[in-house]
Image: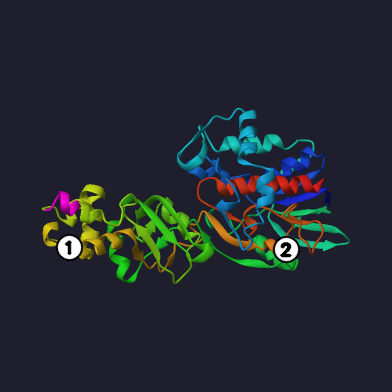
Amino acid sequence: MEKYDVIILGAGAAGLMCAARAGQKGLRVAVLEKAEKPGKKILISGGGRCNFTNVNAGAGNFLSDNPHFAKSALARYTARDFIDLVKRHEIAFHEKTLGQLFCDGSAMQIVQMLLDECPEENVDVICDAEVTAVEHKGGQFAVMASEQMYSSPKLVIATGGPSIPKMGATGFAYDLARQFGLKVVEPRPALVPLTLGGDDVLFRELSGVSAPVTARAGAGKKKAEFAEAALFTHRGLSGPAILQISSYWRSGEEIGIKFLPEADAEWLIGLKKDYPRANLRTVLRHHLPDRLADALADRIGLETEFSNVPDKDLRSAGAQLADWRFSPNGTEGFAKAEVTIGGISTAELSSQTMEAKKVPGLYAIGEAVDVTGWLGGYNFQWAWASGVACGEALA
């Protein structure tokens, strides 16, 4: 039996960050990873360049049953802290839209940085180690992984959620949490394309068409809107704006799309005065891709010149374009979801240390926990922040 001060399950973003901090504190750490190499999700992120954080990251960019839970960790380890780490390792990076930071080179640089941060004499990253049993007796956790037994007084769950199963993702973290009596908030796909059916199915004929929109979903405190691009696909809707609102959408609800985000409520009436011989189709073609413009014009049905259209009809058309209602019949599921909403309930954990309140020595971090960020580097920032909070507390 191999004995350690800490066993971390999962060599992803949160697990490696936690291991680095714990190892730097002098603890002997085993990181057990079932894949053949560490950081597989990091490597595919951001098109292979890793959108490793967002300069705007704050608690307001995260969803959770307890929206206050993430505040402590995020405040103690900020995007600036991680940027400073990247700079110390001389990794070149650039900012894209909306505060998103990417490596100039490869996501492998981030994985290597995390491994380099783990003191070689203290941290063992053990791959091809699939956990088959975990027991807790006499203040010690015993973990069986690939026919090897590991023992430690502290165990960290950092195995993520079930999104992107082709990368080996599973709901293992939730099964383990339930084994120890911890509640799990029902997991569902997040940052995921939405599928269309029924009357909306005709919009799937626009597959490949993209346009800037404002997308809205949710209700009450869970309501949100995002002004980014939407993409029509052969199954429904995707693109950054749709991925963002998918985290707020629930089955059976509608979503609203504003197709011309800059237009006000009276814009068509104003055009009628300036261009009385124009019609809706030609105007929409001036602002939107032709196929999308034609589809919207066909459904609104105003084919005559503006001079022959009553103001109330133009106002109605403008209102429809400002809040076009879609009724998604589902999502493309965990296979296409970038992350998972839900997970180990934050009510079970200390927001300061990530330790389970009921089970001393048991911790949960990263995507395994019911904290989910927006698209654009926010989920990595939660991984870094929760990993640091836990790693510091382990010593």
Q: Is residue 57 magenta?
A: no
Q: Amino acid at mark 1?
A: Leu
Q: Judge by depth and name the residue closer to the eye, 98 or 33.
A: 98
Separation of marks 1 and 2 at Cα, in angstroms: 56 Å
Query: Could you say whether the residue bearing mark 1 is in a helix, strand or loop?
Result: loop
Give the residues drawn in magenta, as a range: 271-276
The correct choice, above or below, for 373 with respect to 236 in the image is above
Residue on which disc 2 sits: 348
- The disc placed on residue 220 is none
Q: Judge by depth and name the residue closer to the eye, 110 or 292.
A: 292
Mark 1 touches mark 2? (CB < 8 Å): no
Q: Amino acid at mark 2?
A: Glu
Residue on which disc 1 sits: 302
Question: Does 366 sit left or right of 4 as displayed?
Answer: left
Which residue occupies 77% across, 43% down? 22
Q: Is residue 274 magenta?
A: yes
Question: Sequence order check: which comes first, mark 1 or mark 2?
Answer: 1
